[in-house]
Structure formats: structure tokens, C-alpha cells
Amino acid sequence: MSSKPISIYELETDDKRFLSPFCWAARFAIIHKGLKPDVIPWHFQEKDKIAFSNQGLVPVIVDQNKDGKWVNDSWEIAKYLEKTYPDQPSLFKGTSGESLCCFFVKSISSGAVVPMMQTIIMDLYNAQLPKDKDWFRKTREDRFGAPLEKFCKGESNVGAFREALQPCRDVLKDYQYLGGSSPCYADMYLLGIFMFAYAVSPVKLLAKDDPLHSWRQRMLKAYDNPQTAHGQKGYPESLE
Amino acid sequence: MSSKPISIYELETDDKRFLSPFCWAARFAIIHKGLKPDVIPWHFQEKDKIAFSNQGLVPVIVDQNKDGKWVNDSWEIAKYLEKTYPDQPSLFKGTSGESLCCFFVKSISSGAVVPMMQTIIMDLYNAQLPKDKDWFRKTREDRFGAPLEKFCKGESNVGAFREALQPCRDVLKDYQYLGGSSPCYADMYLLGIFMFAYAVSPVKLLAKDDPLHSWRQRMLKAYDNPQTAHGQKGYPESLE
């Protein structure tokens, strides 16, 4: 398929750390579809840069193959790509895949993202640009209902995050991927969470003998080990 | 398709209340496949009746279309039916559907079944046959690590159960069923939980304005409102 790259506005810091699990999920969806992501760095509060999308959050994609059509929100982007590029590898793989991936996203975002944030939020705060720190603190403290230092439990909380992923581990007993014998959008969404965390935090979210650890290695290989720029390391050979 | 009924051993009491969500899920899977379930009532501890399956739990199915092949465990039964009757309506609907339904089952069984049991366990205990009550209490108290009376929080706990189903509700904002425009095994598994609870407990697990309430009505209609024999009412017109 001959096509132009898909522009994607992604949240990052000046040192090229990518700071949004949702942007990662959208980027993997673009790659999965055999398209090339053209990443446009974006910082919190740069509302003017994405004003064309009539809202203020990333990811936003712009598809030059379709007259510059834009789509915001990672889930809407996944659905858009699936509908617009039906002959490319499927993100959902079947007529139940879209709604079941929706369940997966909602389930993980309500069950696993909070314990992950409780583990790494101070690392995430420290990774923000100086100009964004006060804003980041205020919006997150409003959301979590507590000062960051109180909400954060640090590395001691990693067990709660791992426990929340037990249903994923159960699936991997019998399947190579959450999508079965090949990845589906659920895999991309979960990988996005790890990429995001890895970009800012030294905490080992998974033990090496965790089935999710080898799943993550398989996924990274399948999606070309994208650069997280964590500690300027470039492409991590293995997300230890 | 001309075929013989599928025999299914299901847990029930003398007054025909069906007491296992897993048996319900397996029965719905049989119906979904356009096959007729031939329900064989089974009581806890009747190990001899299902000794042929080399284990002691129901559901167990026996498929006379396939030389009396037996399968136990609701998930194994679903996979068996899908594989054996590929031309009948699919339970998983796509190559990602099986692993994503596996995720659904694991996620709901770890997240929603416990708060449901905390809500209705005393009703469940009271519905047991007199000969099974002591055994039921002992095995459950060992499992839950507390006396039933302490583990049970009663109707006041219904909010925790409803909250645990929020990801399902989120899906139903955009889809008619968890499987999209038609049910998949995830729908059957969830309906099984409600059928089970309804058979023993008067607690209203869902508010009438809950999107899951109308989903449940659609599902009951799709699967012929099977008899729960709750309070001898026969076929409930609407699971209020």
C-alpha cells in the first residue's frame, strides 16, 4: 500500500520522553495498520497547536491520505483506522473484537492504571517540563483528591499493579497475545501503559519471570522497539 | 441442522432452582449453537453420577452427536462447541474473540463475583439442600476465610457489585451487546451470573435504569427466557 505518513501529536518532554499511554496506543495502532507515524511533539497546554481539533488533548492524528482528516482520542483513532484501512491488518480481528477491546480498555483503565499511577506518579511529576509542573500537580491532585506525595505509594505499590493484571496473565497461559495468536488493540493498549511508565520511571513494573514480561518482549519485537528515550538510552534492548 | 440434544449436568436443588453461573453459561452456549440442552439435574456431592468425567464438578456435557464425547468446565465446553460446530453461530465471533472472552471471564470472576457473593451468599446457603448445607458452609468458609455470616454483607453491598460492572456498562453505551451487534460468550457468561443470583436471592442486583438492566432483558429474549424456578414463578417475564 502506498500512502503518506499519519501525523500524530504526542505528549513529550524536551528530552523526548513520551508521556502518554494513550499516545502510545494510537501510535501502535498506526504501525499495526502498516502506516508510518509522523510524530509531532506536543507539550501540555499547547492548546493552540491542536486547536483545529476543537479540543485540547492528545493524541490527535491528521491523515493526509484523506484530505487532512483529523481524529482525536486514542479509542476513536483506533476505530477510524480500522474503518478507513479495512484491507490492512485488523486491530480488532472479528465482529466481537471491537466491543471486547472496549471492555478491555475500560477494565484496565479503571483497575490497573490507578495502582500504576500510585507507583510512579512522583517520577511522572519530576519528568514534566518546569513550566508544566504546577499545572500538572494541580490537575492531578484535583483528580486524585490528595496531594501527589500522599497519593503516591512508590515502588512498594508495584504488587497492587501486578495483581490488577492477573486476568491478562490468565489469558497468556493459553494464548500468545491478548488477541490470540497475534496482537489486537488490547495488546497495543497494554503495551502503551508500559512504554509510558518506562519512559519516566526506573521501577520494574514486571518481574522477569512474569508471563507478561515475555509477552512484552514479543510485543516490542513486533512493533520495532520504539524509542522511549528513557535516560537517553535510545531503543531499549529489553525492558527489564 | 439435524442433531441430538446435548446432555448437560447442572447443579440444582429439589425445587428446580439452578445454582451455578457456570452451568448457565454452558447452557446458553449450547442454545447459541442452535443445539438443544437436555438438562440433567445434579446435586453437590453426587460424584458418582459424573465419575465418567474423572472429576467432581459441573457443568459436564455429553454429546451424543459425537459418540457420547464428554467435556467438563464451562470454558472448555464453550471451546468444544465452537470447534465442533463451526458452521453454527459463533460464540467468539472472530480470531481475537476467544482470548478476549477469556479475559472477560477472568476479569469478571475476579472482580465482580466476590462482591456478588458477599451480597447473596446467605440466600445461596439457604437454598441448598438440607443434606448439603454443612458441606456447603465448610467449603465456602474455607474459600472465603471467614464465617458465612461475616463474609456476607447483604443487600447493602449491592453497590460494590454494580460498581464492579462499570466496564460492561461503558461498553453498552456504544454497543447492544458485549459482543457488539449480537451476543458473544462474554454476554452468556454475564447473563449466567444474573440467572444464578436470581434463582436464589430476592436482591435486585441492577437498578431499572441501569443500561445493564435493558441488556439483560434483550439477552433473556434472545435466549428464550429460561426457567429459573425462583419462588416457583416459572419463567420470569422480566428479571426486575
Image: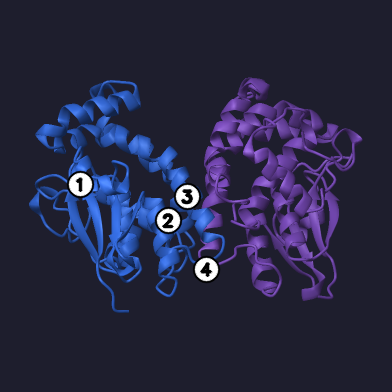
Chain colours: A purple, B blue
Question: Which percent across, then down, holds residue B33?
Answer: 35, 68
Q: Residues within 10 Å of mark 3 (few under 14, many from 20)?
A: many
Question: Which quarter of the image is occupied by the N terminus of chain B?
Answer: bottom left
Question: Which percent across, then down, holds residue A14?
Answer: 89, 40
Question: In the rendered structure, which amino acid carries the disc numbered 4?
Answer: Thr
Judging by the rendered image, the residue that carries numbered circle 4 is: A95
Judging by the rendered image, the residue that carries numbered circle 1 is: B49
Q: Which one is in front in this view, the residue at disc 4 or the one at disc 1?
A: 1
Judging by the rendered image, the residue that carries numbered circle 3 is: B104
Q: Which mark is residue B186?
A: 2
Question: Which percent across, then down, holds residue A55?
Answer: 69, 55
- Spatial CA distance of label 3 from label 1 is 31 Å
- Residue A47 visible in the picture: no
Determine contact: label 2, label 3, CB under 8 Å. yes
- Spatial CA distance of label 2 from label 4 is 13 Å
Q: Chain of mark 1?
A: B
Could you tell me which secondary element the residue under label 3 belongs to? helix
Q: Residues within 10 Å of mark 1 (few under 14, many from 20)?
A: few
Could you tell me which secondary element the residue under label 2 belongs to? helix
Earlier in the chain: of badge 2 and badge 1, it is: 1
Residue at the image point whose x is 30% and y is 35% from the top: B117
Q: Which one is in front in this view, the residue at disc 3 or the one at disc 1?
A: 1
Q: Is residue A22 above or below residue A66?
A: above
Q: Chain of mark 4?
A: A
Residue at the image point whose x is 18% and y is 55% from the top: B40
Residue at the image point whose x is 83% and y is 73% from the top: A3
Question: Which percent across, then down, holds residue B86?
Answer: 44, 71
Q: Residues within 10 Å of mark 2 (few under 14, many from 20)?
A: many
